[in-house]
Amino acid sequence: MENRLEEIMSREPLVVPPSERLARAATAMQARSVGAAVVVEDARVVGILTERDLARAAAAGADPAGAAVASWMTAAPVTMAPSDEPTQALDRMLDRHFRHIPVCEGERLVGMVSLRRLTKAASLGRVDPWRPGSRRGLENVTVGETRLSHIDGARGCLIFAGHDATELALGRSFEDVWALLQSGALPADDGFARRVGALRTAAVPTDVLAAIARSGGPITSQLTTALAATGAAWSLANWHTRDPDEIAEEALRLAAIMPVLVAALWRLGRGLEPLAPDPALPHAVDYLRLLRGAMPDDDEVRGLERYLILAAEHGMNASTFTARVIASTGTDVASTLAGALGAFAGPLHGGAPSLVLDMFDEIGSPERVVPWLDGALARGRRLMGFGHRVYRAEDPRAACLRDTARSLAGPRVVLALDVEKAALERLRAAKPNRALYTNVEFWAAVVLERVGIPRELFTPTFAVARVAGWTAHVVEQVRDNRLIRPTSDYVGPPLEK
Ligand SMILES: CC(C)(COP(=O)(O)OP(=O)(O)OC[C@H]1O[C@@H](n2cnc3c(N)ncnc32)[C@H](O)[C@@H]1OP(=O)(O)O)[C@@H](O)C(=O)NCCC(=O)NCCS
């Protein structure tokens, strides 16, 4: 959209004096095909006469040939300056249900801006979804507003509600960051952590979870089923006509039970009894304990906590967008999370970290790094843990987790550093026009393995973190909702005659 109203306003708006008869003003509006006239007296804007005013006069039985504009106009209308931004005009129109705003320099009328002109100026034009480099995959298409996070892809910086995500990862607890996403501010005490601990309860009866675990299939699919079953067991209803605070509470309850569901499904799938959550423990500690039945050491907790924080939120990624689309229909919160998880599990999104370890296994030893990478790229394979839709610099989460992995040490770190160096050199040579760097999944895989998370649980563990972001987005959508319903270009055959 252009930057100033003067760039899009009509410069010769229809002007009538207040003494003009309604019939003559209406005829002039019709002749000029405009929906409003500015009422000017002594070079000052004193009112605006719109089609709505004319309809009001007609409904009241006013005599158009006799009644003066002054009696039916909207007096002292909102005006704007030529230097104002079109988005400000649009906001004002939407807030106040106007369709026209006179543009004045001081008191002097210089133009008029209409909703039609603003919409035209803002229109994106036709999008060819399949043209490479266009908006295919919705690349660079803005689909909404959020206060939750911002990715500065060019600088490689991730902001969570005004805070640098990597600083949060180094200095805060997962619960603090979760509270930040929930409320917009870092908490001053442990009230939120205690609340989440109390909500981390056994969600659905063990026999229901056991039946889900017995059904087999990937654990991400089981988790999706368990979330939906929890929604049903809790009788979560459509949110559309309900108090948003109630929905926020339901969302928090669901997010809090994620580690409990993951650990229970995991243990049941191995013939082990699920353990009871401990509300007094931090989320990361209790998750590891629920999985393995023993308390983790400090290094493991530090590694997992950093990972959970960095993975908690990340702009309008595919699963978050899915959650918002589903939420926008007014359905229950469990359905939004089950849908988000479905989108999340794919290898191009949250399913990548375990594939990074598969890659390490295939490579096996340091001397095989270069031939393996060359062979994979020659066969057109994508290297897991590299590339990103938004970052055109190093993913700051990858850098932070690389440092974490180094500080925790472990057998994978040396091989991972070798693979990363060689892969970046090769990607740079193979795709000189595309800035390909290490993404979060690469070092997340190393850290998660080091803290003892089984490979099959990498994606569910990612979901334990990301549910904080999903639920915050769902609540943001609920508090200011409009159905998300985009459009598409029809490229099929024409209607048969
Ligand atoms: C993350 C990812 C899906 C982003 O995809 P995208 O923005 O759609 O990127 P594109 O598909 O436009 O890729 C652009 C080019 O870089 C190449 N490329 C991107 N990531 C690559 C990778 N990891 N390995 C090899 N080549 C890669 C593509 O082949 C493409 O080349 P082309 O133009 O010659 O076809 C992609 O980088 C990828 O598949 N990475 C591996 C999976 C992964 O790590 N996922 C976790 C994401 S956090």
Image (cartoon, helix red, strand yellow):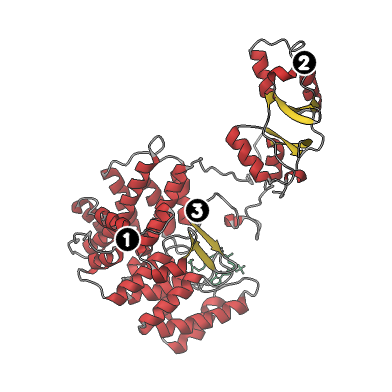
Q: Residue at x 19, y 52 (%)?
A: 207
Give the mark, 3 or 2, whose residue is nearer the N terminus. 2
Q: Position of residue 301 (x, y in %)?
A: 31, 72
Assign a secondary structure to mark 3. loop
Q: What is the spatial separation of the Cα atoms under label 3 and label 2, in whole angstroms?
A: 49 Å
Read off the residue under disc 1.
Answer: 219
Read off the residue under disc 2.
Answer: 23
* Residue type, numbered disc 3: Arg
Q: Residue at x 34, y 56 (%)?
A: 221
> In the displayed structure, would residue 159 be above or below residue 413?
above
Read off the residue under disc 3.
Answer: 147
* Residue type, numbered disc 2: Ala
Please say if the residues under marks 3 and 2 sit with CB atoms less than 8 Å apart: no
Which of the pair 156/45 is nearer the observer? 45
Q: Is mark 2 within 8 Å of ligand 1?
A: no
Query: Within 10 Å of the Cα at label 2, are there few (<14), some (14-19), or many (20+) other Cα atoms?
Result: some
Q: What is the spatial separation of the Cα atoms under label 2 and label 1, in whole angstroms?
A: 72 Å
Ligand 1 placement by image quarter: bottom right
Q: What is the spatial separation of the Cα atoms under label 1 and label 3, in whole angstroms?
A: 32 Å
Query: Within 10 Å of the Cα at label 3, are there few (<14), some (14-19), or many (20+) other Cα atoms?
Result: some
